[in-house]
Image (cartoon, helix red, strand yellow):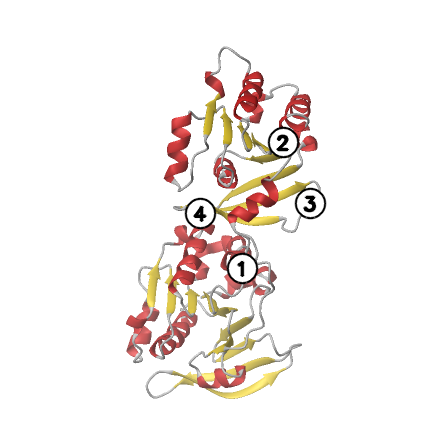
Amino acid sequence: MLTDAEWALDFFREGVVLVRGMPGAGKTLLVARAVSGFGNVAWFTFYETGDRLARYLTSVGLRPPAHVFDLVSVREKAPVEFIVEKVLELKPDAVVVDGLSALAAEGERELVHAIFYHGISRERPVILIKEGVETTPVDYVADTIIEVEHRLLEGGGSIRNVKILKARGRAVRYVSLPYVITEEGPVVITPREEGRPSPVKRIPTGLTEVDSALGGGWLEGSFVAVVGPPDGLASKLMAVSMGWLAMQGYKILYSYHKPTASFIKTAENLGFDTSRIDWRFSSPSRAKSSCWWYEMFSLAARGGYDGVVFDQMELLGGEVVYLLEGVAAVCGAGRCPLVAFVFNSYRTWREAGDKIAALMDYILVLKRRRIILHTPDKLQLHIFNWGLDEMGRPEFYDLFHKGSSD
């Protein structure tokens, strides 16, 4: 995976870079993170005093620029003249102008072309921050255009993406990248450079007949979707499976969104020690944020978990599609041996459609007394009949294969 520093060098290393987006999208933080790799930065702004900007960046774990100038307080000279004078005096490694719209109310193209493109950017990168996403003359002059998209979801959640719209002289490999703002600072999540390794290990489900059909269990590194009816049967099955794994020594992180989780009690009543599982309750509103997903996967990576379960996905509503579209990138190939998503709603799964299904390696659907299992290594579906044994535990039988066309 590219580090933030490598990402910064890739897109902020030379020429005129335009960063645009709506207010609150995170443009300032993104640029501050990118230029933190330069030692001597001159930052010109219409919006902050040097002290306020320094406090703001420090609060999110970023080093303030070496020189910050408030252009509003420049009285004796025109802002452009002031910028040129300070650049000649300080000879910075990079120049940032936060507030292009205020600087170039008229004659934007001529200003950017003459002063920044043919002048200052000859010896160091110039990063221009602009409010809004509309195309203006500077877009045609800039060598690189980066747009920060901030989508607000119902219930207070949000998703941010960084879009590379233009990169003159460089092949644009990644068009859109997840972007999260954490307590440790902003992070642009870039895909791993290496291909996903072929899995060789399997993680058992704890369900004997299912493991037998799978050749020992889920392939390590897989995404699994478990879909069931609104009564929570899918959650109960996963709690039983993860309870069994935990008792075998596997380390499990289990996230859910209802304060009362009856499926935990079900697993306990069936004799599984649920205290071995790391249960994490989060409100649906928190989970409707790409930052929350990043935090969960970071926790899984730091903690060395063998499996992560995200239960009660139906509570995320229609936003689940937008969230899961970025989950694969946030998680990263091989970051966790097993990631499972549990839907206690056929409707939510159906409405999500192929956008979610295409992300999954395995799909397990519970319908009445049957389990239908889609696997990556066989064209045929696995279908199980199942019931409860004398202790109330799920028992599977009459395994047979069905053609995928049915």
Residue 123 disc label: 2
Residue 328 disc label: 1
Residue 366: give x, y in percent of width and height: 49, 74
Q: Secondary structure at mark 4?
A: loop
- If you read the primary sequence from the N terminus, does the residue marked by circle 4 or circle 2 appear first? 2
Residue beneath the point at 67% across and 76% down: 405
Given the image, on which type of amino acid does mark 4 rest? Gly
- If you read the primary sequence from the N terminus, does the residue marked by circle 3 or circle 2 appear first? 2
Residue beneath the point at 60% across and 21% down: 104
Check disc 3: other Cα within 10 Å, few if <14, some if 14-19, many if 20+. few
For the question of whether residue 136 can be seen, the reply is no
Relative to 9, does residue 199 appear above or below in the rendering? below
Relative to 307, does residue 215 appear above or below in the rendering? below
Q: CA distance from mark 3 to mark 1?
A: 25 Å
Residue 157 disc label: 4
Residue 144: give x, y in percent of width and height: 64, 38
Relative to 234, does residue 48 appear above or below in the rendering? above
Q: CA distance from mark 4 to mark 2?
A: 42 Å
Check disc 4: other Cα within 10 Å, few if <14, some if 14-19, many if 20+. many
Q: CA distance from mark 2 to mark 1?
A: 39 Å
**Circles 4 and 1: CB atoms closer than 8 Å:** no
- If you read the primary sequence from the N terminus, does the residue marked by circle 4 or circle 1 appear first? 4
Q: Secondary structure at mark 1?
A: helix
Quadrant placement of the C terminus:
bottom right
Which of the pair 239/115 is nearer the observer?
115
Residue that mark 3 sits on:
170
Given the image, on which type of amino acid does mark 2 rest? Glu
**Circles 3 and 1: CB atoms closer than 8 Å:** no
- If you read the primary sequence from the N terminus, does the residue marked by circle 3 or circle 1 appear first? 3
- If you read the primary sequence from the N terminus, does the residue marked by circle 4 or circle 3 appear first? 4
